[in-house]
Image (tube, grey):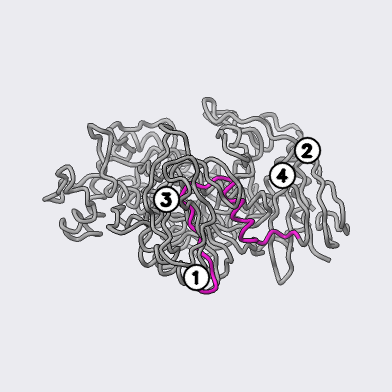
Amino acid sequence: MWGFLYVRMAEFAWSIFEPIEGTFEFDLFDRAIQLAKKYDLKVIIGTPTATPPAWLTDKYPEVLNVSREGVRYNHGSRRHYNYNSEIYRTFSKRIVLEMVEHYKSNSTVVGWQIDNEINCEMNVFYSNADHDSFRQWVKNKYQTLEGLNDAWGGTVFWNQTYTDWKQIYLTRPTVTHSYNPHQLLDEKRFISDSAISFVQMQANIIRSITDKQWVTTNGMFGHLDNHRMTKEVLDFYAYDSYPNFNKVIEDKSMMPLHDRKWSMNLSTVRSFGGGNFAIFEQQAGPGGWVNRLEQPTPRPGQLRLWTYQSIAHGADLVLYFRWRTATKGSEIYWHGINDYHNLPNRRITELKQTSEEIHKIGNTIFHSEYISDAAILTDYPNEWDGEEDNWYGHFIKESKEAWFKAFQYHHIPVDFVNITQEMSLETLAKYRILVYPPHPAILTETTAHLLTRYVEQGGTIIFGARTGYKDLTGQTYMKAFPGYIKDLVGVTVEEYTLLNGWQENPDVNLLNKQFKTTGFNEVLQPEVENVEVMGTYLNAHYEGKPALTKRSVSTGTAYYYGSVFNYQTASILLEDMEATNYQHLFILTPDIELAVRKKDGVSIYLLLNYSYQSQHIQLKAEMENLLDNQTCSGSITLTGYDVLVLKEK
């Protein structure tokens, strides 16, 4: 058995449904959905609000988005509207209402995708409607101008104190191209709230009309709290997975992930809803617009590999983008499964095999749980604040990817966990190891207390430089670094320096291994007796002083590293922590990813070969290959881009 089960349609079709203002037509999609029914396909309909029709933007130009400099973005692309225009919200409500009323009783239609890729292309908004809404947003948040001026502490600095609400705007051009960082952090929160409100508005309409069709949206883009949106608005999250983007996003770092980086993206998506998700756009061929994002054709085996990559990380539903390559518009090179001519090709053959396999193993692997006893902590305040703060912001991505690489290449499954002020200890306690390497400059007393309790009950946690010196507004504490976690790690920061190329970067000696530090150095000062110095700086005026410390707290352990992580430092620490790497079952090469899933008490192991070359591995236990039902053990050769799905006998 093989074949597709779902088809997705209509996400950019506003002009087809409403060709002129107030006139609605459904004939084309009625016929398409009827044809889908004939072939036992279920239909997912996209609300078309990502692309307002020309008659709307021409008559009501205030619905269009505007740059910070005040330049209006014109009709002719996609995602050129703003969330806060009351006119746009009114028209969006009406088109969604008409569509849902029309299809509410159609049994072939199983769900709704709201809009398309929220905050893609543009994730900042500066129309008049946005300025007005932001003014009301801060008024609701702070209640008084005194409260706002206090939260935007820079209002005293450079004489930015506000005396009337009408003086409040989103950030606007300044002579220095520098903006109040506390205002800017609130701006990102406002943009996220605006986007979620727009999605919530549509979801409310759908659910007020039908309870038989689910609601989701797709993407994963900036200035959007996807965790909150998923929890409050969606039935589940959908992601668009394009691993071939690695061909247009250059990675010059040590041990680059290439297409394997999408395992990190998929792990992040898995955290949105606390489990499984959907893929609404799985790469099906070469990609690119006529003028950007040019990507080569995937090699034989890669489409199958990337499909299993999504499933390994929690996708219970995978749709490819698209069926046939478009013959018109900017995306004529964003290839689908079929080429323009609809003739047989290699990609169709490969996905036929993939479909046959998934139909065979689906009941075993779908709705299973990803198993990991390690997690990387992330949070939105640091992500958004770090975008403008060059003293720590770009270290976030660097260290997060370094740790993910270390987990990947040491075959240690890892989760991502979004830490919040409301988080319970129970959420963290299931992990043996937590890494908070995105350099959490913003770290509250509440979070410090939670992480201390986590360590006291037996957990291990790792922090990096620039931790704990800011509050939720982005203002700095008048405390010794690292702020509220000082007592947990048992150290303070004696002095620090940015490493920006004006001097040779100091070396560091960690567990008798020596290499260069990058980005930032904090000189650590132990404050309690049981702090163990595990690494020291070299060739600097602080030579011999602590760079890495370790402290036992009750039955747990806290590490603090005074620099930016790379693959080497993360790997050294993993060895010291003796993290679970399944070496009792496998001997694997670095090119193999290991994912572990569990369902009904049974563990499933997915081995993914990201190399075009064959990989020779060892199975230390007798296992069943679920793809061919053969028993295997001992020496195994995994051909280029091949996949194994194993179950212990």
Labelled disc at residue 613? 2
- Looking at the image, which is closer to me, 288 or 485? 485
Q: Nearer the viewer, mark 2 or mark 3?
A: 3
Task: Calculate the distance from the C-alpha at mark 3 to the C-alpha at mark 4.
Answer: 36 Å
Q: Which mark is residue 591?
A: 4
Where disc 3 sits, the SS reads strand
Q: Secondary structure at mark 2?
A: loop
In the displayed structure image, the side of residue 23 where residue 140 appears, left or right? left
Which residue is label 1 attached to?
A: 553
Task: Please state the extent of the stretch shown in magenta in the rendering.
Answer: 554-583
Quarter of the view holding residue 596: bottom right
Is 289 on the left or on the right of 600, as rendered? left
In the rendered structure, which amino acid carries the disc numbered 2? Answer: Gln
Q: Nearer the viewer, mark 1 or mark 3?
A: 3
Choose the circle earlier in sequence order: 2 or 3: 3
Mark drawn on residue 523: 3
Do the numbered discs 2 and 3 sit on residues whose CB atoms are within 8 Å?
no
